[in-house]
Image: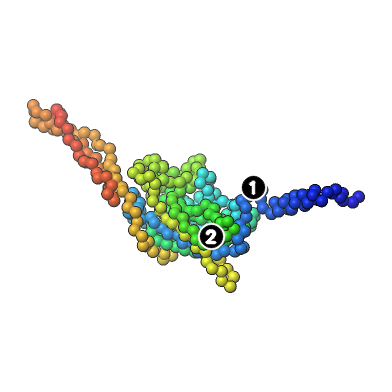
Amino acid sequence: MGTPRLAFPRVAALWALLLASLGSATGQPLGAEPMCTAQPLARYSITFTGKWSQASFPKQYPLFRPPAQWSSLLGAAHSSDYSLWRKDQYVSNGLREFAERGEAWALMREMEAAGERLQSVRGVFSAPAVPSGTGQTSGELEAHSRHSLVSFVVRIVPSPDWFVGVDSLDLCDSGRWREQVAVDLYPYDAGTDSGFTFSSPNFATVPQDTVTEITASSPSHPANSFYYPRLKALPPIARVTLVRLRQSPRAFVPPALDLGAGGNEIVDSLPDPETPLDCEVSLWSPWGLCAGPCGRLGAKSRTRYVRVRPANHGAPCPPLEEEAPCDPDNCL
């Protein structure tokens, strides 16, 4: 039995258009974002600049054992069906190990497995660690029209499970590769450790929480190392810049994954913003004994001590000792 013939040319044209649209729809996942139409490959340099200085973040600033520093940068160029990390979602076991201890191998295996199984990761890239809070490190990456998104993480050292990074930054805009992108970075909590300070001991969060942004007022606890109630927002703690590289005749060679520390301490030429840090004092001690001669009022006193010294024109410390009149307990 032959294929039925369509009676009218207009119907035939509509049928062909429907088949064409169905055929093109099979080329990408249902509900996916439109694919980038730029030329297939683009190379970028990625430069991470730490801005974690004592002037910008004076509260509990780590000076030794270990001093303020940044881990290696680890990231991937990927498609929209992969996520390295995302705000308000749970981190993977690999990212947990990276955020808590700086161990990168499990996270690298997760990214490589996503590339092999789902074809969602184009390639993994890295940059060496920065041995101070202010400094630079850089690397290179390759993006593809099907893998135009970039995500990465850098661990804050020391910290319980805090990191900075970018989630699914699209290097393709309106069918063209972006020439340069710069993004200010702010701290995030991976949701796996409940420590409040840079040097907090390990205290696992049970059950595990989602990724949350750390702000000047959240967590709302005076012990939090990033708690600055006078600020509306924290200054950027880091910055990343991606610059498109001109294509060269030779083939692109992915940079070697160097996860060790390198000599990358480069002081930023721009002055750091000075964040005011108010003085913090302890609670008053109990009143001391009332002393004085018989028949007259005596005096008693109490004290408190400085918990956090002021910095950068923050509020000065209040009096640390107070006296009050009293009736002597054992007059002389």
At 15% from the left edge and 29% from the top edge, which residue is drawn?
326
Note whether 178 is above or below 161 in the view shown.
Answer: below
Q: Secondary structure at mark 2?
A: loop
Helix, strand or loop for disc 1: loop
- Picture colour scheme: rainbow
Say which residue appears at 39% left-offset and 40% top-offset: 220
Q: Is residue 63 left or right of residue 109?
A: left
Between 73 and 12, the one lying in front of the other is 12
Q: Is residue 189 left or right of residue 116?
A: left
Asked if residue 22 can be seen in this view, the reply is yes
Percent position (x, y) of residue 144? 60, 61
The quadrant of the rendering that contains the C terminus is: top left
Q: Give whichever of discs 1 and 2 has the lower sequence position.
A: 1
Q: Residue 301, position in %: x, y? A: 18, 35
Which is more toward the observer, 208 or 229? 229
Numbered circle sitting on residue 178: 2
In the rendered image, is residue 26 in sight? no
Residue highlighted by disc 1? 31
